[in-house]
Amino acid sequence: MITIYDDEATKAIWKAIKKLAAKEGKTASALAREALKEYLKRHGSGNPAYSLDPWGGAPEFRAYPALASDWGEARLAGFTDKDLRHMANKAREALHFTEQEGRKRRILV
């Protein structure tokens, strides 16, 4: 047995699923199983839109911390000087275009 009630929003969703299932002559559990099978069929091998496989063996590919992640000296300690220069240049470029777009939209001065 699996229980999915974890908050009021989920309870409301489950209630709607039960109502829909009844209209279709099925159980809510059957609908949930069908949905999970379909999800697994579509995403079981990962999301192809974000596949990193082509770069997996490429020595020139280096994963950098995401812009919105937590930063600090410890996060950057393992990077080479070349990597740090590259990240700094890309950060300046991102800042330049972000500020340019912000001024255009009049949300940054």
Image (cartoon, rainbow, N blue to C red):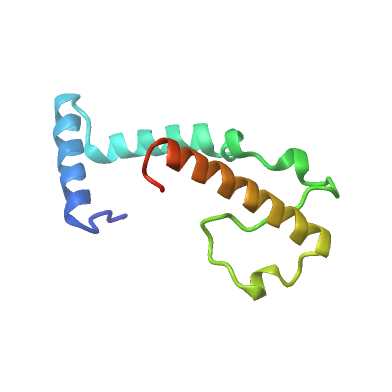
> 13 or 31, which lies in front?
13
> 19 or 8, which lies in front?
8
Residue extending farthest top: 24
Q: How many marks?
A: 0
> 54 or 25, which lies in front?
54
> 35 or 27, which lies in front?
35
Q: Residue at x 51, y 32 (%)?
A: 42
Q: Is residue 63 in view from this perspective?
A: no
The spot of residue 63 in percent (x, y) is: 70, 53
Residue extending farthest bottom: 74
Q: Is residue 69 in view from this perspective?
A: yes
The spot of residue 31 in percent (x, y) is: 29, 34
Q: Residue at x 36, y 35 (%)?
A: 35
The spot of residue 21 in percent (x, y) is: 20, 31
| Residue 44: quarter of image | top right
Q: Residue at x 58, y 46 (%)?
A: 96
Quadrant of the rendering where the N terminus is positioned: bottom left
| Residue 36: quarter of image | top left
Q: Residue at x 77, y 65 (%)?
A: 79
The answer to whether 4 is drawn above or below residue 105 in the figure is below
The spot of residue 53 in percent (x, y) is: 72, 41
The answer to whether 94 is drawn above or below residue 76 in the figure is above
